[in-house]
Amino acid sequence: MNNEKPGAERIGWSLKPLKVFFGDKPPEIITPDSCKRYTAFRLDQGVQISTARTELGTLRAAMRWAVREEIVSKAPRTKLPPRPDARQRWLTRSEAAELVDGCVAHHIRLFVLLALHTAARKSHILTLTWSRVDLQARIIDFRDPAKPRTKKGRARVPINDTLYEALKEAYELRETEFVVEWAGDQVSSIKTGFRAAAKRADLSGITPHTLRHTAATWMAQAGISLWDIAGYLGHSNIKMVEETYAHHCPDYLRTAAGVLG
C-alpha cells in the first residue's frame, strides 16, 4: 500500500481546478476577492472547504516560488478560507482512503479503521480488549464491565467486512490483551502517529474525533435512521444526533413536508 502521495501528483490535482477558474490570466487577477469567489466556486462543485483551502495554498506557494525564481516581481495576496472546525469536519470517502494509506504504523492504521467503521470514541478504542471482540459473531462490545456507565455511552456494534479483515490480521499478531497495541504494550496516545498520517494525506483540520463524526455523517448521508445512528454512537437519546446530523439525511422531514403539500 502506498504510504505517501507523491508531491507532484498532489500539486497536479490542485492545479487542475485552479486553471479552470483562473485560466491563463496574469497573476494580478489573484486578489482576496477572487480567492473568495474561487472558494465559492469549488464549494458549489461539492468539495469541502478544506480542499479549496489546500488548492489555494498550492497557488500561494507557486506564486512565492515564482518570486524567488524572479519570474514575477511580487506575489499576489492569496487569501485562504478559514480552517474548518475540527469537530464539524468530516472526511469524504477518498479523503478517508488517503488517510488510511498515510498510516505507516500498523497500530495507527488499525485505530483509524476502527474509528471509521465503528464510530467509537478514541478512549474507547484504545482501551478495547480482545475479550470484547467476537470475530466469529462479528460483534464489538465497547461496553467495559469494569467501568461505571457514564454520559459518554458505549455501543455494541457489528463488524463489517473491511474491519473484519483488519481485526483478523491484528488478532493473529497480538501480543497483549489490547486490540490497539504497539511493541507489546497498550497504546495510550495516537496523537503523533495520527498527525503524521494526516500530514502524509495532506489533510488539515482533522483530529481523531473527526473520524467518529465522519462515520456518523456517512450513515446519515446513506439514509440510516437517526435512531440507529444514535445507537451506533452510544447515545441514549436522539437530540444531539438530530441537531448534528439531520441535515445530512436525504429524506429528513420529507414525509412531513409531503403531508403539508
Image (cartoon, grey):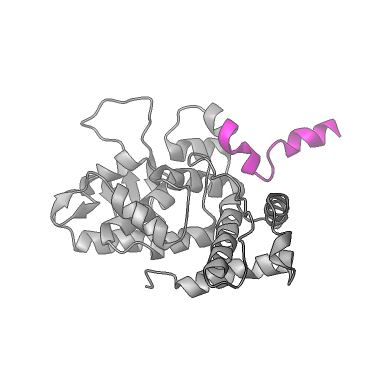
Who's the residue at 61% across and 47% down the image? 81
Quick check: can you spot residue 194?
yes
Is 256 contained in the magenta span?
A: yes
Vertically, is 100 above or below 242?
A: below
- The quarter in which the N terminus is drawn is bottom left
Residue 55 coordinates in the image, percent (x, y):
59, 60
Who's the residue at 54% across and 44% down the image? 84
User: Residue 51 is drawn in which quadrant?
Assistant: bottom right
Of residues 243 and 134, which is closer to you in this image? 243
- The quarter in which the C terminus is drawn is top right
Residue 89 coordinates in the image, percent (x, y):
52, 45
User: Residue 27 is drawn in which quadrant?
Assistant: bottom right
Q: Report the residue that reaches farthest toward the right.
A: 261
Residue 33 coordinates in the image, percent (x, y):
72, 49
Vertically, is 52 above or below 124?
A: below
Residue 38 coordinates in the image, percent (x, y):
70, 56
Could you tell me what secondary structure mostly forms the magenta stretch? helix
Quick check: can you spot residue 238?
no
Q: How many discs appear?
A: 0
Answer with left or right where residue 90 lies relative to residue 75: left
Answer with left or right where residue 53 lies relative to residue 138: right
Answer with left or right where residue 89 lies relative to residue 212: right
Of residues 256 and 28, which is closer to you in this image? 28
Q: Which residues are magenta?
A: 243-261
Who's the residue at 45% across and 40% down the image? 232
Is 138 contained in the magenta span?
A: no
